């Protein structure tokens, strides 16, 4: 019988695994310093607004984002959904978003459930970001009784690791706001944009009425997301947060952890971008197809271009203690250079083995569908999971 490992030894093993785990950036392990900071944090009740660390974190992030107020909540899903719910007051109404966006695909249908809104989910023609022209094409202006008027546009930055060009955000925002349409941003990874472009958080948030900023993705906090926006609006969101059962009582430790991550992990993100670019260069040199541009901490790869599908690469990588989730490869701040080099080595080795195998066709359209439908742990393309009748297309 194997003895279960616990305590410090288990944590050490976990940290070593995570240093070689490319599935996502939400799986980073909290470092010991985080627990020290948590132990010393204030212990007030945040539902009463009486926790010092939570108030300080909210004030700090509101200031950085150039907004009046901020609200700490448990997750990015919650801050997105609370914002959209609090913005949309009276159906019929609709929102516009990118067809690949988290709000549309991965929040369990929350927009329909909580806000009773129709979603116009638009696939950007340029494969990168929505343009003003596409937003206008899909907007419902006026009050024709057959339609659900557009009340909100939700953008995501970064999306699949790609940085939304700020000029286009501003164009969309100027035009939409002039029509009285609200701008919300899922900025779960906006910290990546700050690190990549050097643009201030304030400038990035300026075109939006509200922005959701995750502390638990690239920044590596164990939990938490912060919604920023106008003071009155944030008060209303706190009301909905209560109604959703999302008020946290003694949240000081969690807020202090998030605060620590802002201080200590934000400066590490530029390094993750360099490591991701290094990995991308090496894989591209080996002939691996890059499905999307690599702009921050994510790669989307298809090794069929050198003869084998992604799940075979993932299976082989696993034997070297390297974990891949899907076509998406995420370089978080705890990934080591050694892990990246080991992954490159596995690809090199397989390329050699498969050099005489028949060339596999890259189905770009299917890849784009998969890129939209992927999530951590989903290793099989959806079509393969449906069985052999569809599997023929692989
Ligand atoms: C872009 C984006 N937005 C929002 C979320 C939701 O965050 P949470 O998992 O904290 O609900 C995620 C989660 O991965 C995300 O990737």
Image (tube, rainbow, N blue to C red):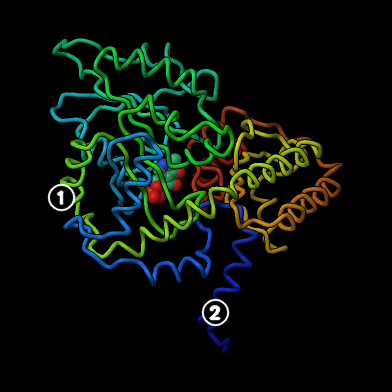
Instruction: Tell me the number on the disc at residue 243.
Output: 1
Residue 201 locus on image (x, y percent)? 45, 35
Which element carries disc 1, helix, strand or loop? helix
Secondary structure of the residue carrying numbered label 2: helix
The C terminus, quarter of image: top right
- Check disc 1: other Cα within 10 Å, few if <14, some if 14-19, many if 20+: few
Between the residue at mark 2 and the residue at mark 1, the CA separation in whole angstroms equals: 39 Å
- Ligand 1 resides in the quarter of the picture at top left
Where is residue 386 drawn, in percent x and y? 49, 44
Task: Give the percent coordinates (x, y) of residue 364.
Answer: 62, 28
Q: Residue at x 53, y 55 (%)?
A: 264
- State the residue in front, 379 or 136: 136
Residue at the location (76% across, 38% down)? 281
Judge from the rendering whether residue 240 lies leftward or rightward of residue 102; answer left or right.
left
If you read the primary sequence from the N terminus, does the residue marked by circle 2 or circle 1 appear first? 2
Residue bearing the label numbered 2: 8
Query: Which quadrant of the structure image shows residue 182?
Result: top left
Query: Dot 2: within a 10 Å radius of its alpha carbon, few (fewer than 14), some, or many (20 or more) residues?
Result: few
Q: From the Cβ of disc 1, is ligand 1 less than 8 Å away? A: no
């Amino acid at each position: 019988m194997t003895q279960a490992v616990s305590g410090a030894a288990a944590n050490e093993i976990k940290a070593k695994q995570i240093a070689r785990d490319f599935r996502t950036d939400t799986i980073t392990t909290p470092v010991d310093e985080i627990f020290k900071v948590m132990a010393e944090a204030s212990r007030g009740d945040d539902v009463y607004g009486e926790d010092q660390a939570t108030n300080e974190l909210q004030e700090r992030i509101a200031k950085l984002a150039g907004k009046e107020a901020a609200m700490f909540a448990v997750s990015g899903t919650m801050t997105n959904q609370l914002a959209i719910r609090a913005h949309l007051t009276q159906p019929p109404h609709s929102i516009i978003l990118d067809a690949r966006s988290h709000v549309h695909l991965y929040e369990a249908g929350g927009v329909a459930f909580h806000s009773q809104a129709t979603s116009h989910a638009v696939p950007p023609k340029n494969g990168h970001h929505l343009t003003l022209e596409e937003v206008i094409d899909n907007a419902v202006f006026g009050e024709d009784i057959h339609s659900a008027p557009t009340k909100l546009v939700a953008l995501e930055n970064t999306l699949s690791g790609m940085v939304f060009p700020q000029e286009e955000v501003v164009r969309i925002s100027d035009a939409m706001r002039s029509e009285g349409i609200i701008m919300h941003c899922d900025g779960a990874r906006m910290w990546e944009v700050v690190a990549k472009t050097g643009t201030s958080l304030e400038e990035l948030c300026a075109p939006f009425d509200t922005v959701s900023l995750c502390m638990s993705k690239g920044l590596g906090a164990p939990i938490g997301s912060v919604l920023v926006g106008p003071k009155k609006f944030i008060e209303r969101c706190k009301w909905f947060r209560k109604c959703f059962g999302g008020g946290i009582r003694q949240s000081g430790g969690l807020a202090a952890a998030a605060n620590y991550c802002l201080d200590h992990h934000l400066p590490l993100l530029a390094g993750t971008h360099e490591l991701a670019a290094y990995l991308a260069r090496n894989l591209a040199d080996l002939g691996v197809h890059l499905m999307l541009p690599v702009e921050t901490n994510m790669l989307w790869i298809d090794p069929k271009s050198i003869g084998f599908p992604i799940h075979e690469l993932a299976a082989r990588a696993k034997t070297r203690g390297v974990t891949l989730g899907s076509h998406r490869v995420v370089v978080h701040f705890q990934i080591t250079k050694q892990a990246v080099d080991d992954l490159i080595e596995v690809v090199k080795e397989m390329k050699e083995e498969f050099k005489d195998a028949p060339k596999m066709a890259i189905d770009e359209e299917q890849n784009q569908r998969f890129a939209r439908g992927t999530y951590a742990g989903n290793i099989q393309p959806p079509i393969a999971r449906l069985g052999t009748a569809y599997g023929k297309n692989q």
